[in-house]
Image (cartoon, coloured by chain):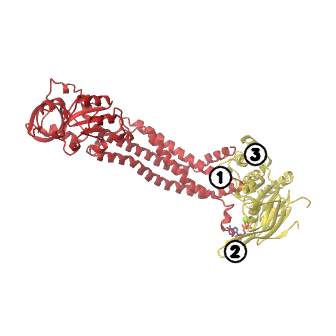
Chain colours: A red, B yellow
Amino acid sequence: MQTSRPILLFAWRNLWRYPKRSGILISVTFLGLASILFFNSLMLSWANSMLDNTLNNLGAQWQIQTEQMQQNPDIEQRFLLSSEQQKTLQNSSLFWAPRLNLPAIAKSEYDTVGVNLLAVNLNRENNVSFIGRFAEQEKISGFNNPKHPYQLIVGKALLDRLNTAVGRKLVLMTQGKDGKLAEIGLRITAAFEHSDPNVEKTMLFMPLATAQKWLLLENQVNQISLKNPQTLTLQEAKITTDSVPQLESIKQQFPQESLLSWRDLQPYAFASISMMDSFNWVWLAMIGVLMLFALLNTLYMSLYERRTELQRLFVLGLKPSHLRRLLLLELLAILSIGTALSWAFMFALVASLPDGIDLSFLAEGTAWIGISHQLFLGYDIELWLSNTLQLIGALLLLGAIPIWRATRFKVLQQTRNSLED
Amino acid sequence: MFHSPVIECQGVCKAFADGDSVIKAIDQVDLEVFGGDFICLYGASGSGKTTLLNLIGGLDRPSSGEVFLDKHPLSHYSDDELTDLRLHKIGFIFQSYNLVPVFSALENVAFILQMQGFSNRDALAKSEYILQQVGLSKLMHRHPAELSGGQQQRVAIARAIVAQPKIVLADEPTANLDSKNSEQLLQLMKQLNQELGTTFIISSHDPQVIQAAERKIELADGKIIHDSLA
Ligand SMILES: Nc1ncnc2c1ncn2[C@@H]1O[C@H](COP(=O)(O)OP(=O)(O)OP(=O)(O)O)[C@@H](O)[C@H]1O
Ligand SMILES: [Mg+2]
């Protein structure tokens, strides 16, 4: 359109006419949007960290176990893992790890402590839980070697508590299937660290085969953890067991046991992660409202100051629609500059934090809320885009109200007092 | 007169509510304005000069009566059509705040043409020509803030006539100028009136303007009490 060009030029010049005011409007947009993007990226990273931690603790993504296992994780919940079942698991393309998860007592020369004994196959735990990751990092290879069956991996905190060390021996006691106390002596092979001090203080890991021999539980386990080979996004992780086709055949193979998802196993973690996700909206709304006040206020003021000029233009033959286009373009330009600055800031910020944000000064706290010491900000383009569109869209829509009002000439302002009205 | 009027007011009234009472700003005005007229509308403050100009320019609608432009009653036009009419057929000059401050003199004049749909090139060429005519060829790239009051009013005149409107309405165009500048402005308007045949209706208190006008119309309390043509 012919008229677009002069109006565009006019809008552009007007932007620099009140540099201070434009500066304020741009700053408000920048501060508001940048803080929304930053906070929401942080929340996303936070939620992802929680999810990662949740899925990498022993619960994994799904778990096969008896109904009562959650209340009483003990030897009574054992079930046979047949070769048929193993084949089905193997063919499912999921990662899986069988375990005996038992309450036990650890005894050193110095102290006796109640612990959570996990008899595992470390090769299988690799990819499924943190202990697998740990074993991989520490290159613990002989753990499943039947030639060295009496091994134990203990948390550092528990080692301190028991006043013992790697290389020393530890005696474990747990209830056998006959109801009597069984006892075994194992050598401590390695000590792991964990962001959750509770895990470090209570968990210890021994080879599954050794435990099965010790407790006379041939091919029996009381827990199988399952996990998708791909890293999951928040949305994917929320999927329940019903909608995963690979789980169908597995369910059929375990008619006695139940297949639970992490949502059911860890309702607290699930609730927290979901809450993080909705914080997104709370923050967006809060900042949005603040920005709106600042922006609309300044906009109202500027339009009020310019009312004579707008009226003159109207008299000269510019239609209200022209004037609206002009003013909306000005607003759009300001919002666009603010948006560009916010995005540039976010890109620079993410690029400048390749090692993530170190939260180790909150170590105890981070463990308590279930995240790692390190939060990694990512280029969350999709999130930024949707946040930007929502915010800028709302600001444009609401900014249109004063603009519409300032250009609503009922022939002339004078007619306000005219009798016929 | 043998030719028909470009503007005709028939029994035009404009009343404003003022609290409980009613002010008749324009009271039963009958008026014929012919092509090429150079009119000064004068009268005491509050006599209704601005109101009458607004009614003629389609900026306000009469409480009763009718204004015709080229025989077309303005009451038949919608607000948007009136706006178009102003853009194409009427030029306006105000007492102050005439120009867009972010545009140069040239851009101010060209803006109206561009809004009429002229290409950028044509608009600038025409505007340059008109600015030369009003004696501002050297100053046309200056912004209003860099021009004197008289120079600004000349730009306003250039803008008012650049699209060759039938009528130019000027509301106290010399009120902010000294007598020398007023005189120059008047001469310019008269010259354009004679060369182009543009109709000028100028409201003013200024004796210089009243004197220079071909046709003088005096308003008092919203009524025409004297018309030099009659
Ligand atoms: N919007 C309005 N509301 C109420 N009264 C108005 C309005 N506009 C004008 N009037 C009244 O109408 C009358 C005529 O006003 P108008 O502005 O036309 O006078 P004027 O001759 O132009 O005066 P001046 O020489 O001071 O410019 C005045 O009494 C004025 O108070
Ligand atoms: Mg007036």
Residue at screen point 79% across, 66% down = B42
* Residue A238 vs residue A391, the one in the foreground: A238
Q: Which amino acid type is marked by label 3?
A: Ser
Figure quadrant of residue A175: top left
- What label does residue B127 carry, if any? 3
Residue A255 x %, y %:
26, 38
Q: What is the CA distance from the residue labelled 1 to the residue labelled 2? A: 33 Å
Residue A120 can be seen, yes or no: yes
Q: Chain for mark 2?
A: B
Tag count? 3
Q: Chain for mark 1?
A: A
Q: Earlier in the sequence, mark 3 or mark 2?
A: 2
Whether labels 3 and 1 belong to a single chain: the reply is no
Question: Is residue B39 shown above or below A51?
Answer: below
SS at badge 3: helix
Where in the image, quadrant-wise, is ligand 1 located?
A: bottom right
- What label does residue B22 carry, if any? 2
Q: Quickly name the residue at label 1.
A: A321
Q: Which amino acid type is marked by label 2?
A: Val
Asked if disc 2 is less than 8 Å from ligand 1, the answer is no
Residue B92 x %, y %:
75, 56
Q: Indicate the quadrant containing the C terminus of chain A: top left, top right, bottom left or bottom right.
A: bottom right
SS at badge 1: helix
Report the mark closest to the observer, 3 or 2.
2
In the displayed structure image, the side of residue B146 where residue A195 appears, left or right: left
